[in-house]
Image (spheres, rainbow, N blue to C red):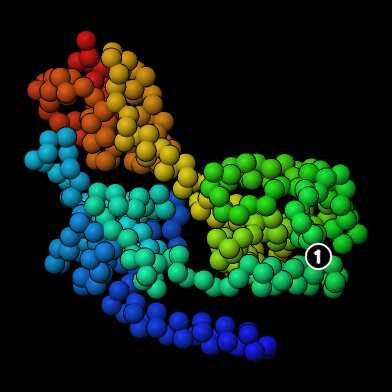
Amino acid sequence: MSTSDEARTTERSEWNRNTSQASTNLASLYLPLSTQPTLVPRRGSDDLPTEVKGSGVRWTEGLGYQIQVPLEDPSQYKVYDVEFINDAWYLLTPTQEGFVTIAKGKLNPNQWGTGVWPEDHPSNPKNIVISTAESFGTYLEEGLQQMSGNPGTSTSPSKGKGKEEPREEETSNGNGGSFRGKAPEIFDGDRTKSKVFISDMTIYMKVNRRNTDIKNPFTRIFIALSFIKGPSIVNWVEAQFRRAKENLIDIAGGDEMDEDLWKDFIEQFEQTYVSSTAKEDAYMQLEKLAMKGDHLDEYIADFVALVSELDWDPDGEIACHYFRAGLPTPLVRQILQHEGNPRTLKKWKDAARTHHT
């Protein structure tokens, strides 16, 4: 190990000790979340700093962290249970087994007065660096060489002087085969380009579907990772490198041809760089959505589409709250006067159509 590597290892170990000590009292829960409900252990004490709780989150003894969501009437509000998970606030849903949440239950930073980690806090994700892009790039290339059984060759894009040119036509993969077509542009973590990248990657994989390496879902993951690099995304790439090796045993039982390996990789990418962007956009649109003129059907169609994009429970209280908020005040009064307070989105839509003139 070189002197610089030893220095980095010592520095990282020191940082880990300091962070471990600091997180004893100031900690985010870390849970693997997905589209399926995950049971959330509620913390037993108020151990988060004021900056993280913000002005909206309150600690309720015996219950945990809660947040007040204002309703249309400023004097009324709804209380929701929340928890700080994976360095973000999530809405919780009570069940017989306990409180649960899903990946898309995450609140936007500062939404409803929630806070975030202070800029200089070691737990702030931007201050956590596992490795540098250059060192991990070497690590990835060495791993690919070992898997292909050809030391000294690499399936990652070649490095040249100046700007890297996109590969086109046929390019040798160093394993007795070749890749055809234009390779995807390097993805550096820019969420505005995530859908384009995944589309280009899918086409590239389809064009090369007869290639030996592409046929192998395990190797296919590392080929895809060779097009994902940059300082802001290197930690995610390194995590996927480890995850793929763990899944090979845990999910595929050592079978590199198990397509579930590739499916899991795509899901991880979309949850991090595609789904989150779509959710943020949908939420911003929902915040501004309101019925215009007499166009009730258009309002309902737009609302249902956004709720679906957000993966909210269509009959949940939050969905009903936002639907009501987008209706004209006179129509809401008519509904409340004749129908009471509808408890599901379907009842709200039916009532709106009944009393809309």
Expressed as whole percent of the image width and height from the top left, the position of residue 242 reads 60, 69
Can you see residue 344?
Answer: no
Quick one: SS at disc 1?
loop
Image height of 183 relative to 115, above or below: above
Instruction: Name the residue located 23 percent from the left edge and 31 percent from the top edge.
Output: 325
Quick check: 77 left or right of 240? Answer: left
Expressed as whole percent of the image width and height from the top left, the position of residue 158 reads 80, 59
Can you see residue 198?
Answer: yes
Instruction: Name the residue located 62 percent from the left edge and 41 percent from the top edge.
Output: 196
Instruction: Name the residue located 74 percent from the left edge and 68 percent from the top edge.
Output: 141
Residue count near mark 1 (Cα–Cα under 10 Å), binned few <14, some 14–19, many ≥20: many
Toward the right, the furthest residue is 176
Expressed as whole percent of the image width and height from the top left, the position of residue 9 reads 56, 85
Q: Amino acid at mark 1?
A: Ser
In what quadrant of the picture does the N terminus appear?
A: bottom right
Residue on which the image places disc 1: 154
- Foreground of the two, 284 or 210: 284
